[in-house]
Image (cartoon, grey):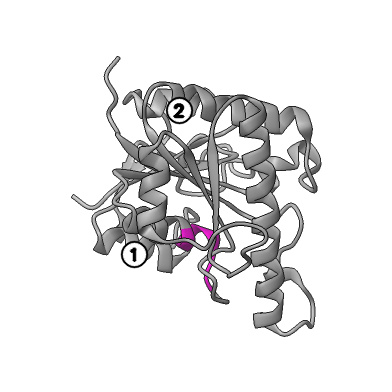
Amino acid sequence: MALKYQRILLKISGEALGGEKGTGFDEPTMDAICGGVKKAHELGVQIGIVVGGGNFWRGRSSGRMERTLADKIGMLATVMNALAVSDKLEQLGVPTEVFTSITMPQVAPAFTRKDALRAMGEGKIAIFGGGTGNPFFSTDTTTALRAVEVSADIMFKATMVDGVYDKDPHKCPDAKKYETLTFTKVLEDRLAVMDGTAATLCRDNKLPILVFDLADPDNIARAVQGENVGTLVYEG
């Protein structure tokens, strides 16, 4: 089957890497997720990945700690996750290159658009750690920013639900799933898809987002080939 998307930016939450416990690394879960990424990569699509840090640290629940400091700790958590995902993919035979938004040359090179495009052009998966390098910005916003910077066709947001609903499907049995959605509606109705900064960035740069369930990692490859997976958010 032909590819619907040639270059994607995939967001994986930190909690996803922790499996059912949601903290640290769960090896079987990481094997499954990275196996799904490998299947998509083998189709020939160029892939960039942004990983969250919630399996180690969540700045917004850091108690009385000063917010910018809490966010810096969160950025470091995402770097740890980027390195772990890179290692797991390399174990599976998938070449990768990690880039950070914070200068730490002993760990990984700093992100530049040119280097990220070179890596993906060489068949490597580019993995971005460190968030945007600034406090107050989520990893959703980081993914949107990197996607726009590297001219990705779409942003894939892998979650624990199979799309976007009008209310929490885990709490409300009558929750309605959207097949498609506009960023304007996401912002106006304050739907829990992503934060407003990320949604606005995607809308203004005409970058669609596909929200889908990572419980089945094969969904990544299915989505790349254009199968009906999750909820597509775009501005018509």
Say if residue 186 shows up in the picture: no
| Quarter in which the N terminus is drawn | top left
From the top left corner, tell me how far across and down residue 117 is, in percent.
36, 48
Q: CA distance from mark 1 to mark 2?
A: 26 Å
The foreground one among 45 and 67 is 45
| Relative to 236, 162 lies left or right | right
Front position among marks 1 and 2: 2
Identify whether 164 is placed above or below 80: above
Camera-nearest residue between 119 and 128: 119
Q: Which mark is residue 201?
A: 1
Residue at 66% of width from left, 48% of height from top? 83
Question: Label 1 amino acid?
Answer: Leu
**Dot 1 alpha-carbon crowd within 10 angstroms: few under 14, some 14 to 19, many 20 or more:** some
Q: Main secondary structure of the magenta part?
A: helix
The amino acid on which the numbered mark 2 sits, given as a three-letter code, is His
97 vs 181, left or right, is: right
Residue placed at 58% from the left, 37% from the top?
173
Task: Name the residue rendered at 53%, 66% in the picture.
Answer: 101
> In the rendering, at what x and y percent does residue 219 appear?
48, 26
Q: Which residues are magenta?
A: 137-142
For label 1, the SS is helix
Residue 59 in view, yes or no: yes
Quadrant of residue 43 within the rendered picture: top left
Measured from the top left, where is residue 99 in percent x and y? 53, 55
User: Which numbered dot is residue 41?
Assistant: 2
Residue 144 falls in which quadrant of the image?
bottom left
Q: Residue at x 23, y 55 (%)?
A: 206
Most foreground residue, 71 or 173 = 71
